[in-house]
Amino acid sequence: MPGQNYSTVPEFILFGFSAFPRQVLPALFLLYLLMYLFTLLGNLLIMAAIWTEHRLHTPMYLFLCALSISEILFTVVITPRMLADLLSTHRSITFTACANQLFFSFTFGYTHSFLLMVMGYDRYVAICRPLHYHILMSLQGCARLLAWSWAGGSLIGITVTLTIFHLTFCEYNVIHHFLCHVFSLLKLACGERTAFVTIAVILVCVTPLIGCLIFIVLSYVFIVAAILRIPSPEGRHKTFSTCASHLTVVIVHYGFASIIYLKSRGPHSLYTDTLMSTMYTVFTPFLSPIIFSLRNKELKNAINKSFYRNFCPKFLRVNSVVVK
């Protein structure tokens, strides 16, 4: 806009938890810390179980292992910074650190969505085209699907980050969020291109998510149709049980995302917006390993074996030394 001076801000202030009563913050810190540690432990146990159990070296569990990796990386990008800000009084983040957080959170978040879509395709091939499963889901085919998932997430991450951080930001640098949130950053941008860039970013963000969801829904339409053609109730139950954990995680993932991004645009307190955002960034990754470990009998048994193999012998050895 002519006649108005803009300046690139050197840092942003994350205001997400600043409005909370100070006495509440230690309790939130402890809650989110425990959830974060459980998320890391749960996903590491899933990865260790899949790695050590040879009977789990199948495409479905290979994709699950990749999903656990993306979930760990996503939480590592967001949660430690959030935990530090809960106990800090100066909640600032540099321009470069904000850009890095935006890039990596988008990369790992969208990779997670693409992997959920790939897992839906894997279940479709296994149930609807079982005779072609070993051809379509060969080692090379699985590697290509994983590579495309990570490449797609990285492409969206770098596209959104470059688009946002090529804008000019006003002197007002307070982000009303606990992380470098894309739409909060757009509100701080100045210039004639801001409205156009906002529409473009929304399209880039929403289109892949809707595309993944449509693909998953279509996969399950064919899966349910194939399951209903199975004559025995036991056969239908056994077949559907191989999809239950994936379908539950998809519902949780898109359910919480819908609550946050499709909520009414009326007035909301900063408390409500912040707590609702933590549902997606902290609570959803926390639920994912629980769902997969409880809803998948093979994986649950493998996790138990891996846990006892790695921890119980050491525990018993320590106890025997103490007794002596």
Image (tube, rainbow, N blue to C red):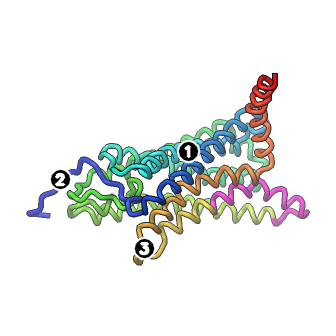
Position of residue 149 measured from the top left corner of the image (x, y, whole percent): 54, 46
Quarter of the picture containing the N terminus is bottom left
Q: Tell me if residue 246 is in the magenta stretch.
A: yes
What residue do we see at 62% from left, 61% from top?
252
Query: Residue 18: which disc?
Result: none
Query: Residue 268: which disc?
Result: 3
Residue, disc 1: 70
| Circle 1 SS class | helix
What residue do we see at 59% from left, 49% from top?
34
Query: Quick check: can you spot residue 255?
Result: yes
Query: What's the residue type where badge 2 is placed?
Result: Ser
The magenta segment: 228-251
Residue, disc 2: 7
Q: Mark 3 vs mark 1: which is more N-terminal? A: 1
Mark in the foreground, 2 or 3: 3
- Crowding around mark 2 (Cα neighbors within 10 Å: few <14, some 14 to 19, many 20+) is few
Quarter of the picture containing the C terminus is top right
- Crowding around mark 1 (Cα neighbors within 10 Å: few <14, some 14 to 19, many 20+) is many
What residue do we see at 73% from left, 49% from top?
293
| Circle 2 SS class | loop
Question: Toward the viewer: 324 or 303?
Answer: 324
